[in-house]
Amino acid sequence: MKKVGLIMGSDSDLPVVEKAVDKLKSLDVPYEAHIYSAHRTPLQAKEFAEGAEEAGFGVLIAFAGKAAHLAGALAASTTLPVIGVPVKSSTLDGLDALLSTVQMPSGIPVATVAIDGAANAAILAAQIIATGEPELAKRLKEDRQAASKKVLDKDSKLKL
């Protein structure tokens, strides 16, 4: 099975990244995490993205706050799907990171999830990989059914 690359721009993004790790673990999806900055280590970020497919990755998830150019920098150097997670890390409550991540030029797409939306990014990455992995697709369906059951259980207990 292809791996998911979790790339954070700074170790300050780790609390958000951990939510993606938890979801990938629950779905039994292999992953690898790294810290590469689009601004402070651009060469290493580029080299990682250029070699990601050969290294067994199927999807990259980029976590970055503020200027948040990491997802775009990775996407510019690979044809693998890249998912951007804008991280709330500034006085603009993550809006700066959201706009930086979602406003990509034509030809270099980045799928973008909500600010701090690490769990959804992990699910989307798993769904992409599951197009060629029937067992993973089954686990995703089971995960969705379990989430539905939790809501219905809460509904049945609701007394107002």
Image (cartoon, rainbow, N blue to C red):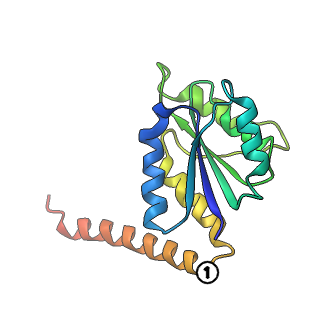
Residue found 63% across the figure and 35% down from its top: 36
Residue found 71% across the figure and 36% down from its top: 44
- In the image, is 99 to the left or to the right of 27? right
Q: In front: 58, or 34?
A: 34
Crowd band around label 1 with a 10 angstrom C-alpha radius: few (<14), some (14–19), many (20+): few
How many numbered callouts?
1
**Would residue 57 be visible to someone looking at this image?**
yes
Identify the element where label 1 is drawn: helix
- In the image, is 66 to the left or to the right of 157? right
Q: In front: 6, or 117?
A: 6
Residue 152 horizontal/vertical position (percent): 30, 70
- Please identify the residue farthest to the right as the structure is shown: 107
State which quarter of the image contains the N terminus: bottom right
104 over 57 or under it: above or below: above
Residue found 51% across the figure and 29% down from its top: 94
State which quarter of the image contains the C terminus: bottom left
The amino acid type, in three-letter code, at marker 1 is: Pro
Residue found 58% across the figure and 64% down from its top: 126
- In the image, is 94 to the left or to the right of 105? left
Residue 23 horizontal/vertical position (percent): 45, 59
Would you identify the image quadrant in which residue 4 lies? bottom right
Would you identify the image quadrant in which residue 154 lies? bottom left
**Would residue 109 be visible to someone looking at this image?**
no
**Residue of label 1:** 134
